[in-house]
């Protein structure tokens, strides 16, 4: 879609993929009632990978990444995050959730708390960080996403792009080892898309392990080391970005790419 | 072409000064014309309303205006009226209020001890201020926490050790949560927090209080619940009901939204059963039926039973109001909290409830107002609330036959209470609106 959204050189020097496994998904299946939404998903994510997931609407992209921090429950197969298997054990779930950051399409900031409070809430209550230290960390990340001056405002007073950057900062304050993004830019105007993508690129440049559901193909080309195409609840094709875009194998992928890139 | 240009091109040479709008468009004239006389139908309605208001006021005004405040009985009132205004004049006899106001306020509470309920009211008002207005220092909330026990001691009196033991039960319950949660999880802690205090109160509290009292006898004259009456009893039931039903209602609402099957069904059944039966039936249950279920010989205070019933009743309504607030909250808020690793109780306490309660404020206050007025129903089970006292005031030969003045007074008192609650709720809504947008 908007290949123009990424207009700067991306520093790939620190983007190193190690052979340590960050997420291991094997034979994972999920149903909504009788609707088989995810079918036999196998996916291994190594530390430092930047994976972009794309696919037509309703193909199960959101469901897949929401399974990784158990916002959705899977019914068969295995998901292991950072060595911890996701089961109905609440302790494991809370542990994994505090290690895995997530950004949503609609930001999901807490409107009754200030930006700073949004960012310090989880460190203080989940990590038991002293308030002062949590605030310092929060200000550090707000600086990073370039909105420290908004710290004492409420989310409702910020633009969409600013809110999404706060949401990213809020996740980062938990010092996550993995970040999940579910269409972080699709509720935003074009100028704001750029500022959010810039933030995400910076994150990638620092070596964060990232899984992004996005239709920003410019971002995928610039940052991703792997692009995954999903359709009808299955992983149809995956490849490194250049091959994926220039030489797609499956017909479904070709069709999807021709629609989304407007060729 | 050039013609069009000549017409469209335009340059202003002199700027216009600010002018006042035409008289017909401003102030009272405009308002009256637009709001009262804008059409024929409107004119007719306006005139009819004026006539109606005039009729009501012209009948009521003399009654209030001529009211008699100093007399010892209704006959004396009538005599004064006949002497000063003539026998046909309409005049209220508010002397009954001046004569019996103490009884209307305190019922049969011993008059030497009137200072206790009065002090309680003052403490109550001062004590809840830190809760109502968040600008006050948060440390004051500890005082608010101690308030129920102080009030309990002041109102009923007896040995201070009884109150201390009641409070100790709560401390034990709290300690049970703190100690048992890390060991056995939330469910064990909840069971412990309920069972330990109850066992303590039944088996240990009585003897402990007695022995402590024999060592250090401090206390106030004991006043039985049956001597409580008037507005005091309405306030005691109302305030206790409000204070207890809010937390209970919130818990029930969460229970009804819970994924845990048993918790969900129990909360739902409780809410539906309590809501589906009139309060008066529950009050009769409290006053008559409970005696059959309790072991013979136990003397379970009637007022306490009524407070429990009123609390349960109001909690069911509040639960539904809060559930509405919970449902109105976008799913993203729950997910945002979950994705940060907050536990269920943390996300409820920090994210969900603050927002859901904010949405529910009007409904909650509405329930409170309903509860407060419903306390007048206790007259049917023999508690002498203000309505009950009107009967006993009329039973004396002095005031036999007086109705309106008493009811007007009682109505006014209730109105003041309820109206201020409504105003506070508006204040709170506005304040929260300002804060978060
Ligand atoms: N809670 C639910 N209950 C039942 N069906 C659901 C639920 N959530 C999603 N679905 C269905 O599951 C399928 C996959 O949904 P999902 O949100 O994962 O798609 P997606 O790939 O993220 O699509 P989009 O690009 O539109 O966000 C869709 O067909 C959707 O209708
Ligand atoms: Mg989606």
Image (cartoon, coloured by chain):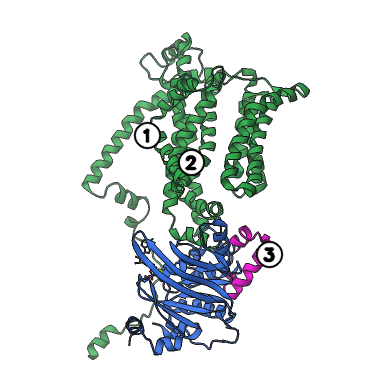
Chain colours: A blue, B green
The N terminus of chain B - image quarter: bottom left
Expressed as whole percent of the image width and height from the top left, the position of residue B252 reads 47, 42
In this rendering, position of residue B392 left or right of residue A133 = left
Q: Residue A133: which numbered mark, if any?
A: 3
Q: Where is residue B379 in the image (x, y as percent from the top left)?
A: 45, 21
Which circle's residue, 2 or 1, is located before the other in the chain?
2
Residues under labels 3 and 2: Cα distance? 37 Å
Looking at the rendering, the stretch of residues picked out in magenta corresponds to A120-149
- The residue at which mark 1 appears reads as B276
Q: Label 3 vs label 1: CA separation?
A: 52 Å
Q: Is residue A237 above or below residue A137?
A: below
Rendered image: mark on residue B249 = 2
State yes or no: Cβ of the residue under disc 2 lies below 8 Å from any atom of ligand 1: no
Q: Tag 3, which secondary structure? A: helix
- Which residue is pictured at 54% across the width and 86% down the height? A10
Identify the main secondary structure in magenta.
Answer: helix
Q: Which one is in front in this view, the residue at disc 3 or the one at disc 1?
A: 1
Chain under disc 3: A
The answer, for residue A222, to whether it is visible in the render is yes
């Amino acid at each position: 879609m908007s290949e123009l959204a990424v207009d700067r050189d991306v520093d790939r020097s620190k983007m190193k993929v190690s052979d340590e496994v960050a997420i291991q998904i094997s034979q994972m299946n999920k149903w909504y009632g009788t609707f088989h939404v995810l079918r036999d998903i196998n996916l291994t994510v190594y530390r430092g990978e930047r994976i972009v997931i794309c696919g037509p609407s309703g193909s199960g992209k959101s469901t897949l990444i929401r399974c990784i921090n158990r916002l959705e429950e899977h019914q068969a197969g295995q998901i292991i995050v950072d060595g911890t298997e996701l089961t109905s054990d609440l302790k494991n779930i809370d542990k994994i959730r505090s290690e895995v950051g997530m950004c949503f399409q609609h930001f999901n900031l807490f409107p009754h708390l200030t930006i700073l409070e949004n960012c310090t809430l989880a460190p203080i209550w989940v990590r038991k960080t002293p308030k002062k230290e949590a605030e310092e960390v929060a200000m550090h990340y707000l600086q990073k996403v370039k909105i420290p001056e908004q710290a004492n405002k409420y989310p409702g007073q910020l633009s969409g792009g600013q809110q999404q950057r706060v949401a990213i900062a809020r996740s980062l304050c938990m010092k996550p080892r993995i970040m999940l993004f579910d269409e972080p830019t699709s509720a935003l105007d074009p100028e704001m898309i750029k500022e959010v993508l810039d933030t995400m690129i910076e994150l990638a440049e620092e070596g964060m392990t990232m899984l992004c559901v996005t239709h920003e193909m410019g971002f995928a080309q610039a940052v991703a080391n792997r692009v995954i195409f999903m359709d009808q609840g299955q992983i149809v094709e995956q490849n490194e970005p250049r091959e994926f875009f220039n030489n797609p194998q499956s017909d479904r992928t070709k069709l999807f790419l021709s629609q989304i890139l407007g060729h | 072409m050039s013609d069009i240009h000549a017409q469209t091109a335009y340059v202003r040479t002199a700027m216009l000064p600010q002018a006042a709008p035409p008289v017909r468009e401003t102030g009272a004239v405009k308002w009256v014309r637009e709001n009262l006389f804008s059409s024929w139908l409107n004119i007719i309605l306006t005139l009819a309303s004026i006539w109606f208001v005039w009729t009501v006021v012209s009948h009521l005004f003399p009654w209030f205006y001529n009211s008699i405040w100093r007399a010892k009985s209704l006959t004396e009132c009538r005599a004064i009226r006949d002497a000063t205004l003539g026998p046909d004049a309409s005049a209220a006899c508010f002397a009954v209020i001046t004569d019996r106001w103490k009884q209307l306020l305190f019922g049969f509470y011993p008059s030497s001890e009137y200072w206790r309920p009065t002090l309680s009211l003052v403490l109550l008002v001062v004590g809840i201020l830190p809760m109502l207005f968040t600008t006050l220092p948060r440390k004051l909330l500890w005082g608010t926490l101690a308030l129920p026990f102080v009030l309990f001691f002041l109102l009923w009196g007896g040995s201070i050790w009884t109150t201390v033991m009641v409070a100790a039960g709560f401390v034990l319950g709290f300690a049970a949560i703190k100690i048992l949660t890390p060991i056995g999880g939330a469910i064990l802690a909840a069971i412990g927090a309920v069972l330990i205090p109850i066992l303590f109160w039944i088996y240990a509290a009585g003897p402990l209080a007695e022995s402590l009292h024999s060592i250090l006898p401090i206390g106030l004259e004991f006043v039985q619940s049956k001597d409580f009456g008037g507005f005091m009893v309405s306030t005691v039931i109302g305030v206790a009901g409000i204070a207890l039903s809010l937390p209970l209602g919130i818990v029930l609402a969460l229970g009804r939204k819970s994924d845990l099957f048993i918790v969900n069904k129990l909360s739902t059944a409780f809410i539906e059963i309590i809501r589906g039966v009139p309060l008066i039936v529950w009050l009769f249950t409290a006053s008559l039926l409970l005696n059959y279920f309790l072991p013979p010989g136990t003397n379970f205070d009637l007022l306490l039973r009524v407070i429990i019933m009123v609390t349960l009743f109001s909690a069911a309504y509040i639960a539904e109001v809060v559930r509405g607030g919970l449902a109105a909250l976008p799913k993203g808020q729950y997910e945002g909290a979950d994705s940060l690793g907050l536990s269920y109780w943390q996300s409820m306490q920090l994210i969900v409830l603050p927002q859901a309660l904010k949405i529910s404020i009007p409904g909650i206050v509405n329930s409170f107002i309903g509860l407060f007025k419903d306390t007048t129903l206790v007259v049917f089970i023999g508690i002498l609330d203000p309505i009950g006292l009107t009967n006993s005031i009329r039973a004396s030969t002095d005031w036999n036959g007086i109705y309106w003045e008493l009811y007007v007074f009682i109505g006014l008192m209730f109105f003041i209470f309820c109206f201020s609650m409504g105003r506070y709720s508006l204040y709170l809504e506005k304040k929260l609106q300002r804060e978060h947008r």
